[in-house]
Structures are given as C-alpha cells and as structure tokens.
Image (cartoon, rainbow, N blue to C red):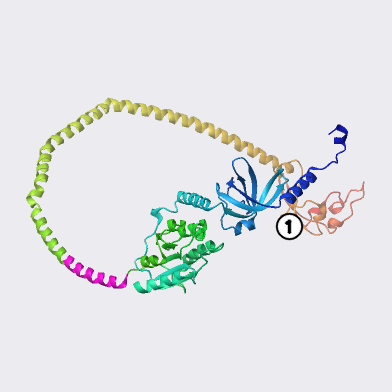
Amino acid sequence: MAEPERANIAEQTVSELSAALKKTVEDAYGYVRVRGEISGYKGPHSSGHCYFALKDESARIDAVVWKGVFGRMRIKPEEGLEVVVTGRLTTYPGRSNYQIVIETLEPAGLGALMALLEERKKKLAAEGLFDEARKQLLPFLPEVIGVITSPTGAVIRDILHRLADRFPRHVLVWPVRVQGETSAAEVAAAIRGFNALPAKGRIPRPDLIIVARGGGSLEDLWSFNEEIVVRATAASMIPLISAVGHETDITLIDFAADRRAPTPTAAAEMAVPVRSELLGQLSALGARRFAGWQRGIEQRRKELRSLMRALPTAERLFEARRQRLDALADRLPQALRANAHGHDRRYSRIAARLSPETLRVRLARARDRLGGISERNGRAMHVLIRHRRAAAESAFKLLAAFSYRGVLERGFALVRDGEGKPLRAASAVTGRMRLDIEFADGRVGAVADERGSGAPPSAPGKPRPRGGGSSGQGSLFGA
C-alpha cells in the first residue's frame, strides 16, 4: 500500500481494535469442540474460576472455566488429562490473546479416564490416605450399622436380608444418589453426617458404616473415585466398609476404606458374625477355659516345687558377704594408721606456721595498723568539727542579718496590738487600742488616742502639744 493510502486509514484506539477483534472471533467461530491435554492447571483461583491451557503436539490455547460451570462439572480438570471440551471462542483484550470459555468437559475416551484415575490414586496415596497404618479395626459385634446407599435398589435389601440371617442388628440407612453429578457430594455428606451424630443422642451413632452400590461401568462408578468421597472416607472416625460394584470393580474409596468387600452381601458378612456359630464357640471356649485352668494350677504346683529346690540356703546366701566383711576388717587398722599419719603431717605443717614469734610479729603489725587508724581518725574528727563550727557561725550571722532586732538597734520600733500581732499600718490602729511598742532596749505599753487612724494630720509648722501643754507625744504613753 502506498504511503498516501496508509495515511488515509481511519485511526482506532487499542480498545476499539480489541473489541473489533473480539467480535470477529466470536462471530466467526462461536461454539467449538476441542480435544487437547490440560496444561498449567493449579486448581481453582481464589475467585472460584479456573485458568489453564489446552495443548497438543504443536499448539496451545488458553482456557477458562467460570465458577458456576466448575461446580456442575462431574469430571474436574486435572493436570495432564486429555479431554474434549465444548465452549465459546473469544479474546481477552487485557493480554491480546484468544481463549476458549469452557462449558462442558469430559475425558477423551476410557483411556483418559483410566489415566486420570491412576494419577489421582498416586496423588492421594502420596498424602498417606491409603496407608494401612491409619486404618481401623472393625468392631466384632456392632450395635448400630449405618448403610449409605440408594434406598430403592436391590443393594439395601441384600444387606438387610444377610444381616437378619447372621446376627440381626439395628440398621440406619442414609439415602443417597449413587450415580450422577451430585452423588459424590451426597455420599461424602452422608459419611460426615454419621460421624457428626452424638454418641448418646436421639438418633444412635453407628459403630460401623457400609458404603454400598451395585455394579456398573467405570463412568457409572466414577462418583466413588472423586476426591471429596475419598477424603471423607479417610477422615471417618467410624470404621467403614467399602462395597462398591462387583468383585472386579475397583474404585478409590476401596483404598481409603478400612475394609473392602467384593459385594454388598459380603460387606454384611464382614459386619457381623453368625450368631449360632458364636454360641457354639462360647460353649467350646468355656470348656477349654476350665480345662486350661486345671492344667495351669497343676503346672504352677510343679513350678513351685522346682523353685523351692532351686532356692539357696541361708548359709550360701551369706558366704560371699562374710568373706567381704573379713577382708574389710583386715584392711581397717592399716587404713586407720594411714589416715592418722596423714592428719599428723597436716597438723605439723599448720603448727610450723603458728610459732610464738610469728604471732608476735602479726600482733605488732596489727597494733601499728590500729595506731595509724586512730591517728587518722583524730585528725579527721578535728577537721570535721572546724567545718561544723564555721558552718554554724555562718548560719548565726545570716540569722542575725535577717532578724528584726537589727532594725530595732538602728532606732526603729515594732508596734503590736493587744494580742501581740504586729501592726504594719496606721489604718490598723483604732481609738483606745492597747499597743505594745518594742524598742531595742525593751518594751513599752501604750493606748491610742480617741482619734485613732481617722484623725487628721497636724498642720505643718505647728508641733502637736505634748501632755501638760508641752511639745511631744504625751498622750501616746498616757494610760
């Protein structure tokens, strides 16, 4: 295409182009049926949707299964499983690729189912669900037997008839579908339901569970190969017998169950013993028990006599002890002498260090040390007294500086009322109030004149007359 022609092409956004491609693919193909091998499957996403790819020798295509479709699928996706899927071909603009939205999924023939079954068996076995060590023993004579099967088939009738012939027991039937999309979930729910019953509730809790179904094709028995059924069987705290199909039919529940029965009738035979045979066995065991008790008593008598002959006498029991005591008695004087000699040497070493001259030297050193300590103590005491005397003199001077008596010595006086409280202003003095005036050299009592604090001040230049017409404060000290 020439340059001018390319320049005239209409401009599109990425979203517009992606939408056009999506519409073209969906219109051109619509629903398709594709065969391929599942690759990159890691289980459902947290949203519930599943994402993986379908591939063959030379190509691959992305696939998605929505949450609602995944829940309805009888055969779930498995890594490496060859399947035939039906769905809509579309594109995903976010990554610019095309994908198939799967609506149905089924294995590509019987070989694919067997491959899926083998792969699932290996996976569950690796988790330890088929280990013999975790399997429980069946109760010898269960009081209550729970049967999980279809209530309308011949299987339940065969089981009930066989139980009635051998040893009648209380039977609880949990009806389920044994084929179809919901059968696996129903069987798993029934196993969990029996385990959830209280031990002494209104509905008795079974002591044994039988999961039973008649024969059929691999597709018919596929519900008993589902993980949900196998995991519920392995988690059952009640012993469980698997009786699915005929003797040649093998399902994964058979490996997880505590026991596998080839047929539902055989499961009933495993569940209970024959009552008449038990009665005969009890009679025979009773006779054998009595005979065994008699033989045991006689055997104990013989063993007791043999043991009495084999027991040693008192003299033989104490022979070795007497010999050892004599040997120790012979060694005791020598050991005492050696011990005394060792203590004597130790005493001599210590006595050499404690001579009178050594004691006199140590005493003289201690006396000199005590004299030095006493001298230092005397000097320290004199220094401490001088410091305390200087501190007391300083505090006394400070007290004198702050005392009001220093002010009195400078010619001032302290005036108190009759109760001894200091008066700081003339306004506090009332007429005829008794006053106490303190000078530096003593105290004088006085009475205020009638004017008190409200008297007008004297005229300037005219001295107030003292008592008797002379100048001064005669009235202040008059009584």
Characterize the local packing of mark 1: few (<14), some (14-19) or many (20 or more) Cα atoms within 10 angstroms. Answer: some
Q: Nearer the viewer, residue 477 or 316?
A: 316
Residue 446, image x, y percentages: 77, 54
Residue 308: image quadrant is: bottom left
As rendered, which of 463 and 249 lies closer to the eye? 249
The kind of residue on which mark 1 rests is: Gly
Residue 275 located within the stretch drawn in magenta: yes
Whether residue 169 is visible, yes or no, is: no
Give the x, y percent position of residue 181.
56, 62
Residue at the image position 54 percent from the left and 34 percent from the top: 385
Residue at the (43%, 53%) spot, across then down: 130
Percent of width and height locating residue 145: 41, 69
Query: Up-down: is 351 above or below 453?
Result: above
Residue annotated with mark 1: 418
Along the line of sight, the residue nearer the viewer: 448 or 103: 103
Q: Residue at x 13, y 61 (%)?
A: 299
Which of the image's four quarters has the C terminus?
A: bottom right
In this view, the residue in front, 382 or 165, is: 165
Measuring from the top left, give residue 456's x and y in whole percent. 89, 54
Asked if residue 361 lies left or right of residue 123, the reply is left
Could you tell me what secondary structure mostly forms the magenta stretch?
helix
221 part of magenta stretch: no
Residue 320 lies, with reference to residue 450, above or below; the image says: above
Magenta stretch in the rendered image? 274-293
